[in-house]
Image: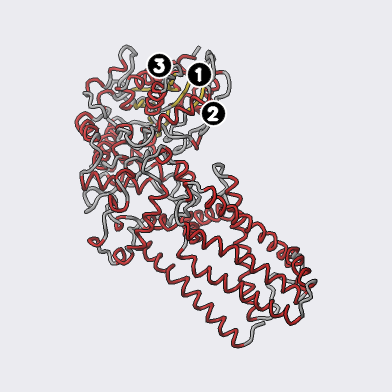
Amino acid sequence: MLSLPEKIIFALIILGTAALFLTPLVARYRIIRAGLPENRFDHLAKRVLHALSKILFQRCTLKNERLFTGFMHVFIFYGALTFDTVTVNHTLEGFIPSFYMFGRGAFGDFFSLLVDTFAILVLAGVFFFAFKRFILRPKAYATTPKDSVIIYTALILITLSYLYFEAFSIAHHPDTMRLSTLGSALSSAIQGSGLSAAAVAAHFKIGWWLHILLVYAFIAYVPHSKYLHMITGSLNLVFRAPGIGRTIPGFNLEGSETFGIEKALDLTWKDCLDALACMECGRCQDVCPAFQSDKPLSPKMILFNMKQHLLKNGPALLKKNRDDLPALVPQIHTEGEIWTCTTCGACMHVCPVEIEHIPKIVGMRQSQVLMESKFPAELNAFFRNMETNANPWGIGFSKRIDWADGLGIKLIQEHPGTEYLFWVGCAGSYEEEGKKTARAFASLLKKAGVDFAILGLEEKCCGDSARRLGNEYLFQTLAAETIDLFARHKIKKILTICPHGYNTFRNEYPKSLELLSAVGAEAKAHYRTIEVTHHAEFLAKLVREGRLKVRPNREGSLTYHDPCYLGRHNGILDEPRELLSDIGGRPVVELENSREHSFCCGAGGGLMWMEESLGKRINHMRADEVIRAGAKGVATACPFCQTMLRDALKDKAKDDIQVKDLAVLLAESIE
């Protein structure tokens, strides 16, 4: 098809495109490699299969929070794969006349139909995104408008130039028509126009060159654009860590020179890959309670600004020159951003390429707290109370067991070898509504004949809020003492009434064991054998087994607020609803955002102990959903959530809508 001089020129274009594509790609790879080591290579085959299934079946974009947008992305994705394949054929066709890699049979005919179909679908998808970005202009799409213009223009021109080439190809060589319905229709118009055979042949050659040059120009541009997520996002899915949002990376306090994430050199290679994998879709921003309540934080902008910082400071990063790198806070990320995250995990749940936002935000908190001693003023009292009395309120140790007065509950010291330890937690021990939950749960356990005991005055805070607020030293101190305590009393199973304690014992402590040098090998080995259960699961099990008989006695409907650390982070979604259906005698009224899409109450990430001075109150936004649901009562399974919802409903003069824990509601409904 091409003359010898044209083939030489084309070969040089291919080499030039490869250089233009690979040079920035290698630069980005080197930035990723400059990150701190982190093992994400275990079960590699399983990782690759997971990524392929999400990519090829587009499970990454077909999510129910943006289903229609997901389908439009599917059109462009499969269209891109189809046209990539056509580009290979198009390239070889330049060197081998009449080359067609799909064969002369049925498959070749079908592929020609597929290309025409996806040409239409790609154009539909591009026009949809262009209209949404530049006409509707949602906040989620506010970044890199010029990049979007270039990408949309390139996709349109590449698709139209292919149709131009295809039409004249069929007009020039009618045997290439196959099932190309669109190309055939355009070819018929050309043939009816009276163009000479020489003119048709010239247009055929021009169409070939135009299409291939546009494709290769776009390939050279890809590494500089968000379209690179086709590569980096796919790799990110391979190296994901399931459930990473429910655990915060710790570090060796004795062997570390820096704590947390102060500068870009403190990022792991996976953190760097995350930044380069962001496709700027803004799904994380759409569901973030901090962003939705007009606070400075946008999970998307955390990644976007981190990416810009890495690309700008690549040379210093590669040289490991710490002095030439600015501190991430406040130069790259503001204090308002990192201190308004509730760590609810909604951002990570909806991210198509499973970017890990929370560890980066908390890592920056760790640096601020441990290296700079900079944190919101109200946390001074919180940290002091935790250090002196091992609870957020600073109430004396002697009061920790007052909630159990008159219940005849055994202490672990009096009842060694008990089957279950009831970990009461700080809220259950000191906060008024929490005490009601603790008493209700304990009475239910006794009624069901469960063998349990409590630690009493030996119990201390589990350390959840301390870790999420960046005070890793305080967390590890509390964790070491608690793990030793469990080993000393030979604890086998733990029951909790707080999702934060549940998550800490089930997920945080096991991953922190190797960091706790003060804990002996035997205590660590013992901890790995402990079974942890949340009271929502346990109560549902007792009812199913008939050990607790429920007598529905509710007037009016009940709704359920899913605590982030119970539902989204740990997948406990059905058991609370089973209980409430039994209690109310009818299905649960679901809130607008429920189950794994639940909207945070605003207390997670340690924000329970901070003043919410920026933007709207998150708990008020959640209370509005409760009010719109029209339910007469709200159930939850977290003392933090209960406090936040109760206060918000009271602020809105809706304190007739009672907020109660599952255990309290069940205790009221027991025969």
Residue 77: give x, y in percent of width and height: 59, 57
Residue 91: give x, y in percent of width and height: 61, 75
Q: Nearer the viewer, residue 559 or 159?
A: 159
The answer to whether residue 106 shows anywhere in this view is no
Residue 442 higher or lower than 610, as above or below: above
For mark 2, does the 10 Å Cα neighbourhood hold few (<14), some (14 to 19), or many (20 or more) residues?
some
Residue 534 higher or lower than 181, as above or below: above
Q: Check disc 1 and report the residue beneath it.
A: 632
SS at mark 1? loop
Residue 216 higher or lower than 358, as above or below: below
Name the amino acid, label 1: Lys
SS at mark 3? helix
| Residue drawn at x 55%, y 22% as measured from the top left | 581
Q: Nearer the viewer, residue 615 or 582?
A: 615
Residue 664: give x, y in percent of width and height: 43, 18
Q: Check disc 3 and report the residue beneath it.
A: 443
Distance (Cα) linking label 1 and label 3: 25 Å
Q: Check disc 2 and report the residue beneath it.
A: 590
| Residue drawn at x 49%, y 22% as measured from the top left | 542
Mark number for residue 147? Answer: none
Specify which label sits upstream in the sequence, 3 or 2.
3
Specify which label sits upstream in the sequence, 1 or 2.
2
Q: Nearer the viewer, residue 163 or 25?
A: 163
Label 3 or label 2, whichever lies nearer to me, is 2
For residue 453, side relative to residue 203 (left or right): left
